Amino acid sequence: MCGIVGYIGSRPVLPVLLDGLARLEYRGYDSAGIAFILRGQIRICKKKGRLAQLEQALAAADLAGEPIRVGIGHTRWATHGAPSDENSHPHLSANGRIAVVHNGIIENYIDLKRYLCAQGCCFHSETDTEVVAHLVDLHYERDCPGDLMAAVCLTLAELEGSYALGVLCADQPDRFIAARKDSPLVIGLGEDGHFIASDIPALLGQTRRVLIMEDREVAVIERQRVQLFDALGRPVCREPLQVQWDSTAAEKGGYKHFMMKEIFEEPRAVRDTLTRHIRRGALDLPAIGWPRPVRQVCIVACGTAYHAGMVAKIVIEQLCRVPVVVDIASEFRYRDPILDDETMVIIISQSGETLDTLAAMREARSRGGHILAVVNVVGSSIAREAAAVLFTAAGPEIAVASTKAYSTQLAALYLLAFSLAQRLNRMTAAEVGEKIDALLAVPAMIDSVLASQAEIQRFAAAHFNAHSIFFMGRGLDYALAMEASLKLKEISYIHSEAYAGGELKHGTIALIEPGTLVICPLTQPALLDKMISNIREVKARGALILGILTPSCRKAADVCDAVFMLPDVPPLLAPLVAVTPTQLFAYYMSLNKGLDVDKPRNLAKSVTVE
Ligand code: AGP
């Protein structure tokens, strides 16, 4: 998604802005730009392509030593208008007095553009954002001369959609304005100036004291002062957060890629997520707000988070005997969902900013659902709007492909399932304690899987030229297969499908031909004989089978061409451990193909558009 930075202070502005943009690169982008005030004029430098192109253009302008004290910057992930220099941000008003950077979508920009053209404005880009620059300038000129804050507020009142904005005015070199609605924006409080950024890691090179902006808030950022106002223009006082993330936590820590670092963090991340919500062997969860009765559970998420929800469905239904519906957020929003105040709605999101998921949560809330969010990023929109939050402790997940976040989502969801089962008297406290002990043994099991990564690396080396790979499983293994298939697709660009073992014969088996690789998680003894039959079916068509087995399913090794043995994890908890070899497989397949593992093509870390 787009990334925003801004700075006003006594440090050299351009290096501060470039450092922030570099720390936002992981969000995915196709162009970048910077605007700053120099001798009463706004100067802009913006380029399609990577940050390096922008840095070269700035170097060519020879600005070192110039008295630049305020600026804003942007990395763009195209939504309206193809990647190009003209469509890059910042965008200027016609007279060059106002510059704007924006993350989000102005849904009514066409009407606004029509109105502005009628006012004589000329547009230079295809973007929605450019209307903001012209509108602010129009209000600044016509309705509130000299009052930048007022001009911005008048503009915001006309916008529909989502925005995180940085606004610069050539007449006002002592401040800039920040505003947000639905798209994240944080303020950094420094010793020699103040900052804004789309997320916390972008600030870690400058400060650890941050203010999370709330929806519809506006901030006036000055060298020695930050003023925060709510939607009604009332001053807001909020204690800054002291960010604990070590800056190396957002670096690669010696691994070749963030993704590998984050896979190897899974034992710590799962352990931290569990221990955060367990005290003396018993559950210690925040107030969940379960409805009475819990007539149904509705899980809503996207992508990997949705796959975590598929695991949770099976676990909750098995332990709690409550019906669970799992929905893709972008579908949920528009299917007139059936829920009421006896429905527990579980929203799962690593970033807490996925717009489809955020909107689905609002839809569920409007229908009376009790909202619980399972989120990784503190201060994110979903975390702040949900009635209750169960935070995962994955730490910053930088690689676009989600790995440790998935594992920690599962850990949190197991605890939630135990909590509901105990609440419904489906499990005694002692039984929950036993399950907790089994969960606490999982990090060590993941460690042992990681110690065998070379087996996966060798297998990937023999298969990275495959053009299509199938994952097949039943029950929890099918839910896991869905996530394993997504991981492979999104970073290796190899076509892959995940199928329920019993379903292949209803059509897709037609795609199996000699040499087709079929990967089977085999961790569910109760379904093993059926799976062995399904494996025989595809083997009869020439498929090559990689089995990922627990010891209790060891007999399936006889029908596999290659086997990866897992530790003896209980079947109910198996996805927590079995996912790791599938993530390693995807990683090595991508690495062998020489692809950008951390920033795969077309993808963004946080999808804050519909
Ligand atoms: C995960 O590998 C993908 N990058 C993507 O599916 C992601 O899980 C999805 O966009 C949801 O993101 P969220 O968890 O931040 O809401």
Image (spheres, helix red, strand yellow):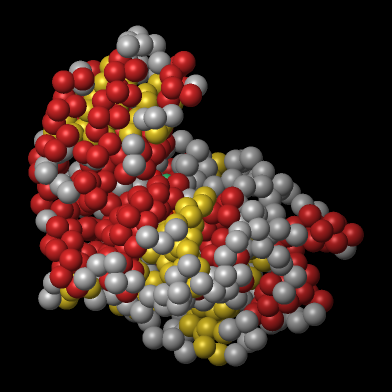
The correct choice, above or below, for 599 with respect to 19 in the image is: above
Q: Residue furthest right?
A: 118
Residue 102: name its quadrant.
Answer: bottom right
The structure residue drawn at horizontal position 30% and vertical position 15%, both measured from the top left corner, is 539
Residue 599: name its quadrant.
Answer: top left
Camera-side residue of 390 and 502 = 502
Horizontal placement of 86 versus 484: left or right?
right
Residue 82: x, y in percent? 64, 40
Camera-side residue of 402 and 337 = 337
The correct choice, above or below, for 153 with respect to 269 in the image is: below
Camera-side residue of 237 and 402 = 402
The structure residue drawn at horizontal position 61% and vertical position 59%, both measured from the top left corner, is 337
Can residue 284 be seen from the camera position used here?
Answer: yes
Residue 593: x, y in percent? 33, 24
The structure residue drawn at horizontal position 54% and vertical position 54%, both measured from the top left corner, is 329
Can residue 460 be seen from the camera position used here?
Answer: no
The structure residue drawn at horizontal position 58% and vertical position 84%, both measured from the top left corner, is 230
